[in-house]
Amino acid sequence: MSVLTQLNVIQVNGLSKTVNTFEGELTILKDISFNVKSGDSVAIVGASGSGKSTLLSLLAGLDIASQGSISLDGALLNELDEEARAALRAEKIGFVFQSFMLVQSLTALENVMLPAELAGQKDAKQQAMELLEKVGLAHRVGHYPSQLSGGEQQRVAIARAFVGKPKILFADEPSANLDSKNGHLIENLLFELNEQNGTTLVLVTHDEILAQKCHQILHIEGGELEKSTTGERANVG
């Protein structure tokens, strides 16, 4: 195995996704290839309907490609069954969604603890407390989602995503449902935790300014990878 291969936590080769419709076969993604180095931040940008959210689902193993391969930290997703993909997600992947996806009947602390508890980690509560402190919510640990603002709920969701120290974090329009002030706070928080934990960050966004803050920018147009460019972080350090 080459040094380059070892550094690439995500490897995508010839990825395509087609679905059958009443009008025939529809190609959503076509022949996409790229690599992501461990610890980097990557933005997937494109217009609505370009296929960027489908690409994120494929990368996370939530959907299956029609052609091509995806390797996450050395594991080929197309060689894993649904149970094995779920186990891989539980062990190595975190998620942040634009709709927060918190469990309404659990407190902020319990929401953050949940993935670690499901993974059988004995220090779930300690991890959750530390992460809530990092995102500035140590004073809100006992509050339920309905008692939190949108920005606070998304900070809880980010803390939950980082519990268990995932190798890769996928974020789908993480600041889309927030006002400008809270949106920027959430974005800065993601990059801060990405750098502190060495977690590879892959985010879908329509915001070109946010995309420019990443190491790498993947421009998706009409289901194809139009180009890959470097962002501001590629020139740091």
Image (cartoon, rainbow, N blue to C red):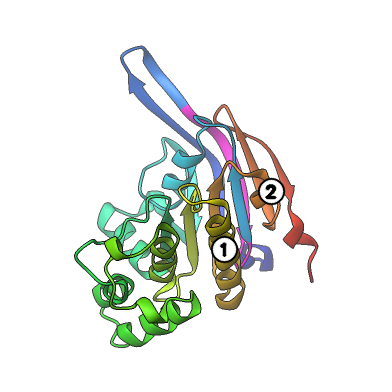
Q: Is residue 145 left or right of residue 235?
A: left
Read off the magenta span.
Answer: 28-40
Tell me, yes or no, if residue 10 can be seen here. Answer: no
Q: Are marks 1 and 2 in contact (CB under 8 Å)?
A: no
Q: Is residue 164 magenta?
A: no
Q: Residues within 10 Å of mark 1 (few under 14, many from 20)?
A: some
Quadrant in the picture for the C terminus: bottom right
Viewer-proximal residue among 32 and 199: 199
Q: Main secondary structure of the magenta part?
A: strand
Q: For residue 142, which quarter of the picture?
A: bottom left
Q: Is residue 38 magenta?
A: yes
Quadrant in the picture for the N terminus: bottom right
Which residue of the protein is positioned furthest toward the left in this rendering? 105
Mark 1: secondary structure: helix
Does 28 sit above or below residue 202?
A: above
- Give the mark toward the camera: 1 or 2: 1
Mark count: 2
Mark seen at residue 209: 2
Does 8 sit above or below residue 193?
A: above
Residue found 58% across the figure and 74% down from its top: 198
Q: For residue 2, which quarter of the picture?
A: bottom right
Q: Can you identify the residue that label 1 sits on? A: 185
Give the distance between the C-alpha atoms of the residues marked 1 and 2, in whole angstroms: 14 Å
